[in-house]
Image (tube, grey):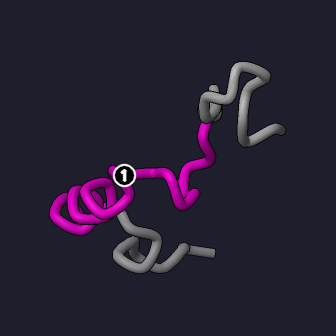
Amino acid sequence: LQKVSPGGLPTFSAHPARFSPDDKFSRHRLALKRRFGVLPTQKGRAVL
């Protein structure tokens, strides 16, 4: 992936990774998961 287009303009990722440096909403996503109790650490123990 090139950082600069042939015209000299910066390029953008079409599908940025979920926790990439250019993900501006990861903090909000984690806050919502924490608020609604859906983080992996907030789930109950698996029943075997």
Residue in the picture at 73% in, 42% down = 3
Which residue was labeled with disc 1?
A: 24
Which residue, as the protein is rendered here, is positioned at the far front?
Answer: 8
Label 1: element kind: loop
Residue in the picture at 46% in, 51% down = 23
Q: Nearer the viewer, residue 19 or 39?
A: 19
Q: Nearer the viewer, residue 44 or 37?
A: 37
Q: Quadrant of the N terminus?
A: top right
Q: Quadrant of the rendered structure where residue 34 is?
A: bottom left
Which residue, as the protein is rendered here, is positioned at the far right?
Answer: 1
Is residue 32 highlighted in magenta?
yes
Q: Position of residue 19 (x, y in %)?
A: 54, 59
Q: Nearer the viewer, residue 39 or 25?
A: 25
The boundaries of the magenta stretch are: 15-38
Kind of residue at disc 1: Lys
Q: Position of residue 14 (x, y in %)?
A: 63, 26
Q: Quadrant of the rendered structure where residue 27 is?
A: bottom left
Where is 14 relative to 42, above or below?
above
Position of 45 with respect to 10 (left or right) is: left
